[in-house]
Image (cartoon, helix red, strand yellow):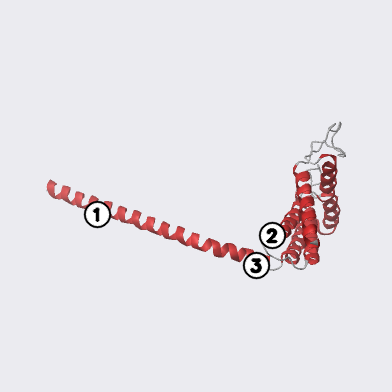
Amino acid sequence: LGARILWLVTAVAWLFMGASLLSFDLADAPSHVAWPQNPTPQNWCGVTGAHAAYYTLRFVGAPVWVMMLGVGVALALPVAGKRVGHVAVRLVGMVMMVASLAALAAIATPLGGAIPDLPGGLLGAVISSELLARFGVVGGILWSLLGLGIGAVVALDRWLVTVPRWLYQTSRPTASRVGKKAAEVTVAVAGAGAGAAARGSRWAVGALWAGV
């Protein structure tokens, strides 16, 4: 019973956070960017949603959606009868992925983001500034990608192999059918072309003999 209640509370919080982020309005309080602010929050989840979305995006930026995706998968697996193991370890991996993506976003698109100039939030700004100071742009990108890869291995574990294998095995029959149809069409076109060429040759020979 306790596990079900925990799952339900987490699912509701996840939905609330997702709706708050999707409906984020830069002019809602407590935004520091727009003035005057909206007299009434435009966020779907009201004042609380506006605050939650603003501070989340200000801290971590768009990479928060990676965490949202991970939590969504963790919530969906028990519904499908699957068990999520090593939750704490996977959470560490997700945090590594989010931090690496935040730094990568700050390096690659320093002027972008839902909040201007904070594409990776304050977290990305701090990490990227340290990476750029020590390794430059290329080195900072490489270190960010390395952190992203390590985080993915820690968070996803065997799914990094299982999902691509499943996609490959699923796509093989389709690719085989497409290849077979393409071969049949090629043979048919080649046959039609050969037939037309043969008829053209016979006509040319007949015309030559008639001229003689």
Q: Residues within 10 Å of mark 1 (few under 14, many from 20)?
A: few
The answer for how far apart the CA atoms under marks 1 and 3 are is 54 Å
Locate residue 83: give its quadrant: bottom right
The relative height of residue 207 versus residue 169 in the rendered view (above or below) is: above
Q: What kind of residue is marked 1?
A: Ala
Q: Which label number is shown at residue 198? A: 1
Front tag of 3 and 2 = 2
Locate residue 131: give its quadrant: bottom right
Q: What kind of residue is marked 2?
A: Val
Q: Is residue 12 left or right of residue 164?
A: right
Q: Secondary structure at mark 1?
A: helix
- Image coordinates of residue 105 in percent, x first then y, are 76, 51
Of residues 5 and 164, the one nearer the viewer is 5
Residue at (84%, 35%) from the top-left corner? Answer: 34
Residue where numbered disc 2 is placed: 79
Front tag of 2 and 1 = 2
Residue at (24%, 54%) from the top-left corner? Answer: 198
Front tag of 1 and 3 = 3
Residue at (69%, 59%) from the top-left corner? Answer: 79
Asked if labels 2 and 3 touch by Cβ distance under 8 angstroms, the answer is no
The answer for how far apart the CA atoms under marks 2 and 1 are is 65 Å
Asked if labels 3 and 1 touch by Cβ distance under 8 angstroms, the answer is no
Q: Which label number is shown at residue 161? A: 3
Q: What kind of residue is marked 3?
A: Val
Q: Secondary structure at mark 2?
A: helix
Of residues 145 and 161, the one nearer the viewer is 161
